[in-house]
Image (cartoon, grey):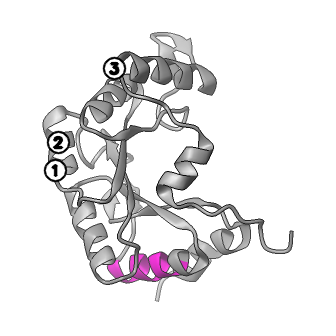
Amino acid sequence: GTDMAGATERVAHVAECRPEICTLECGTMNFAEADYVMTNTPGTLTAMGRMMTELGVKPEIEAFDTGHLWYAKQLVSDGVLEANALVQLCMGVPWGAPDDLNTLMAMVNNIPDGWTFSAFGLGRHQMPMVAASVLAGGNVRVGLEDNLMLDRGVLAQNYQLVDRAVSLIENLGARVIGPAEVREKLGLVKRAPVGK
């Protein structure tokens, strides 16, 4: 008895559009604002994860805290998600994992072998988290969803954040890979939307 959308409704656009990757937020948490709760029950996550896997769409597990990683590992153990999981460590989102190095490393140390991870930080912590994730052996996420500013008082355009991250990654001695190599690494399959 609820007016909240169920798993089928929440995955309907994925079934229609057939993206290569889609988000699966692996837990429930209080989310920034005073009256917003991101609700993802175990049953809903299991159903959505199973639908995504059956559709051939790779879930990008978003982990906002260590308990979310714990549940993601259970989904893999139960055969809901494939063993070569992709996880995004979401750092600094109130009231999830803080964006400090100790918390990042606690999360990184809980990622199973064979998984691919990336991490992001919010606002002014976006580029420091790029460096931290690379140094921890991971990948990165940047963009306007997580940070609007290029510098103090200077609004960013998305490409500027990407350019800055690429420079930082390369200066750390790591390499940025292109779409074809990403598809191969993650085992992605490009499909046309239903009816196209």
- Circle 1 packing at 10 Å, graded few (<14), some (14-19), many (20+), is few
Amino acid at pointer 2: Met
Question: Residue at 37% across / 83% down in the picture?
Answer: 43
Q: Which mark is residue 109?
A: 1
Mark number, residue 105: 2
**Picture coordinates of residue 122, whole percent (x, y):** 39, 33
On screen, residue 63 above or below 159: below
Mark 3 neighbour density, 10 Å: few (under 14) some (14–19) many (20 or more): few
Taking the spot 37% from the left edge, 44% from the top edge, the residue there is 118
Q: Secondary structure at mark 3?
A: loop
Whether the residues at callouts 1 and 2 have beta carbons within 8 Å, the answer is yes
Q: Quadrant of the C terminus?
A: bottom right
Q: Which residues are magenta?
A: 42-51
Q: CA distance from mark 3 to mark 2?
A: 18 Å
On the image, which quarter does residue 5 sit in? bottom right
- Sequence-wise, the earlier of marks 3 and 1 is 1
Q: CA distance from mark 1 to mark 2?
A: 6 Å
Query: Is residue 6 among what the camera can see?
Result: no
The circle on residue 172 is: 3
